[in-house]
Amino acid sequence: MRIRAALPALVGAVALTGTFLSTPAQAAGRVYIYQVYYDSPGSDRGSNTSLNAEWVRIKNSTSSTVALRNWKIKDKTGYTYTFGNVTIGPGKTKKVHTGKGTNTAYDKYWGRSWYVWNNTGDTAYLYKPSGVKADDCTWGSSGDYRYC
């Protein structure tokens, strides 16, 4: 008789918490801006070496590979880098350098001849192909880089 009386309460508790019938769900990761190096070392004279020391690193914290085709990185001014046919594996990062270079699996190059990120403060935005903002990262005038 006691079991019958306790059964509805147990079923209700399971329905509310989900602890009896399922395992805890893994947090759904995301693709986000991990770090921005906005003030390359030395004076800003526009050399390709200096431009490539300015970069944005994005990270995939999901448990699946994500296709980055048509994802965009933008600054406040509207300068835009668009990913091509690129994927990012689970737990992996990609670095987008401002200057010119040869793309590799890890390093991508924007191909610009002048800086994107303002040393005195700026915001980096990451957009999905649908145009929905996936993330942003803002910094002020102190330091050279920011973990987001």
Image (tube, rainbow, N blue to C red):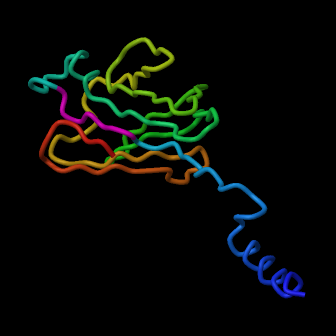
Asked if residue 57 lies left or right of residue 18, the reply is left
Asked if residue 120 lies left or right of residue 104, the reply is left
Indicate yes or no whether the magenta region holds residue 35: yes
- Which span is picked out in magenta? 34-40
Quadrant that contains the N terminus = bottom right
Q: Residue at x 45, y 45 (%)?
A: 126
Q: Is residue 53 above or below residue 38?
A: above
> As rendered, which of 27 and 30 lies closer to the eye?
27
> Hey, which residue is sitting farthest front in the picture?
1
Residue 101 screen position, x and y as percent? 38, 13
Residue 75 screen position, x and y as percent? 34, 44
Indicate yes or no whether the magenta region holds residue 3: no
Q: Residue at x 49, y 40 (%)?
A: 72
Asked if residue 74 lies left or right of residue 85, the reply is left
Picture quadrant where residue 43 is located: top left
**How many numbered callouts?**
0
Residue 50 screen position, x and y as percent? 21, 20
Residue 103 screen position, x and y as percent? 46, 15
Picture quadrant where residue 78 is located: top left
Q: Residue at x 45, y 28 (%)?
A: 94
Q: Is residue 62 above or below residue 52?
A: below
> Hey, which residue is sitting farthest top in the picture?
102
